[in-house]
Image (cartoon, rainbow, N blue to C red):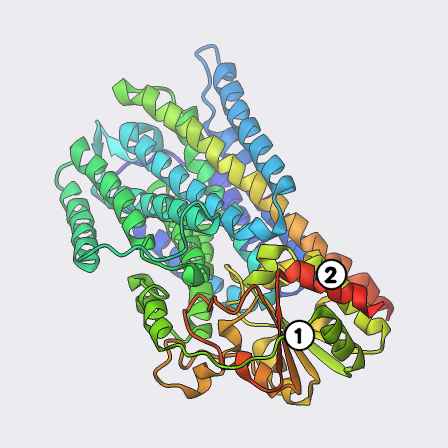
Amino acid sequence: MEHLTVNPFASLAYLVAGVCFILALRGLSSPATSQRGNRMGIIGMTIAVVTTLVTHVPTLDAGALDAVTIVEILAAIGIGAAIGIVTARKIAMTDMPQLVAAFHSLVGMAAVLVAAAAFLNPQAFGIAENGVIFVQSRIEMGLGIAIGAITFSGSVIAFLKLNGNMGGKPIMLPGRHVINLGVLAAILGLIAYFTQDQSPWIFWTVTILSFAIGFLLIIPIGGADMPVVVSMLNSYSGWAAAAMGFTLHNTAMIITGALVGSSGAILSYIMCKAMNRSFISVIAGGFGGDSAAASGEAKEQRPWKRGSAEDAAFLLGQAEQVIIVPGYGMAVSQAQHTLREMGDKLKAHGVRVKYAIHPVAGRMPGHMNVLLAEANVPYDDVFELEDINSEFAQTDIAFVIGANDVTNPAAKTDKTSPIYGMPVLDVEKAKTVLFIKRSMGGVGYAGVDNDVFYMDNTMMLLGDAKKMVEEIVKSLD
Amino acid sequence: MDFISILSIFVMACFVGYYVVWSVTPALHTPLMAVTNAISSVIIVGALIASAAVALGSGGAVSKWLGLLAVVLASINIFGGFAVTARMLAMYKKKEKPAAAK
């Protein structure tokens, strides 16, 4: 096995790049060090790219550098940079989940293209002798293209669902588990056969089947499970990079792939735990579709109290402590800035204002935190579920805006509820609950009715979250 | 490098990733995803090798163009990912001063 001769300095440089990436993630342990972390990531990436260019750009016969190739590559980087930077500047913070899904799809597609390029021109990658690709490289390449293709098509579906181009309701195909398992088995079988026979048809069939399985895996998963899906695809994009790193014997790619892979896996775990659901049940999909219909029948008319913005403002102004519970609805109506204004007004009235964030509030991990940060809410005021849950009992007002399932006490008491066992915010323990909701008709994504609506100490504020908060702010003056 | 050394690096890196990611504060989980996105585009290394390769045989030219396309996609991700992470982190940063001034 003669691999392309690797410059020892290049290997060292890739190792340094890998270490920079570790430090980049390490920096995120606190907001204070996070920007330094991001810069470490940029440094690592620069080292990796420059090293590759320096060691791989071909020289012409005369010994000069191949200018055409250099220009082509720099142009490609330039186009990508322009698109990337413009998108990053323009994107609204509420659209962050879609953006992340779109970015995942690009990593997946890039992995597919690189694996295909390596298959078509193995000599350039030093993974073949006389046109025969090494067996080990065939496995790595096969896995790389499969994971890359799954990441791509899965992320595209996740993007369409998050962006609203496709309904959030799960789409169920009959016999989908059998189809999915069959396709997965076929992919693995073909990769195994690929080690014996490097015919192109095997390679391309693996690619097509992998695109198909990514699509099939994500369409039955409902909107509320998107935090898990986005984290999972994040993990896959890492494993795809790692598989290509094995093919290229590149330490930077392997370290990064392992980091990103474990990062996504841990986030998926955290999200699943926050919903008390197993990873398998999320992946099997279908949550939110049928159960909504089932609970719809059993629904009875129960009395509830409706309040106006003036009533809410009066109560809020009298309170000693208010805990705000934001959810996806706040993101949809872009209410975070107005909400912060309300918080400021209340603070001026001498009210203590805190924010309680459930791990799965929103459509991706940390979604609410970013929106509140965008609206300039001090992060000392923002608390995680386990840190604030005991405080609701000593709180005058729990102000729920755009959240529903994460406040549902049925998760603690009703064993038949689809969300039973999910850790929830104990809003019902507060003296008064103010609940902003678009209408009484809709139920949360889990399709479960929430007892909090009908409690004596709950006042429902029906309307668009942003308009309602604006009116409250006006009434506070 | 032989397979075992590469595998060792990979396994060790998985452990490093495990401990580093658990230490990330939940408030920064969205920036974490954005930045991991950006760094997983280190796959651009493979794309650059393909684009820079001297065309060999019939597959060479196609391979080169696939490589260049992959360079574009990975660059979108690298620049976009780091830029959007920086934008998000700057929002967290702003609050530090008033908090410290209290």
Kindly indicate whether the residues beneath marks 2 and 1 are on one polypeptide chain. Answer: yes
Image spot of residue A314 (x, y percent): 78, 77
Quarter of the rendering occupied by the C terminus of chain A: bottom right
Direction from residue A50 to residue A168 in the image, left or right: left
Q: CA distance from mark 2 to mark 1?
A: 15 Å
Is A56 rendered above or below residue A431? above
Quarter of the rendering occupied by the N terminus of chain A: top left
Residue A216: give its label.
none
The chain under label 1 reads: A
**Residue drawn 51% across the image and 74% down it:** A406
Confirm whether residue B88 shows in the render.
yes
Of the pair B35 and A427, the residue shown nearer to us: A427
Image spot of residue A372 (x, y percent): 67, 61
Direction from residue A346 to residue A429 in the image, left or right: left
Residue A338 lies in quadrant: bottom right
| Disc number lying in front (2 or 1) | 1
Label 1 sits on a secondary structure element that is: loop
Q: Amino acid at mark 1?
A: Gly
Direction from residue B7 to residue A443 in the image, left or right: right
Residue carrying label 1: A307
**Residue drawn 44% across the image and 54% down it:** A234
Of the pair A236 and B61, the residue shown nearer to us: A236
Confirm whether residue A48 shows in the render.
no
**Residue drawn 33% across the image and 68% down it:** A293
Residue carrying label 2: A470
Image spot of residue B38 (x, y percent): 53, 46
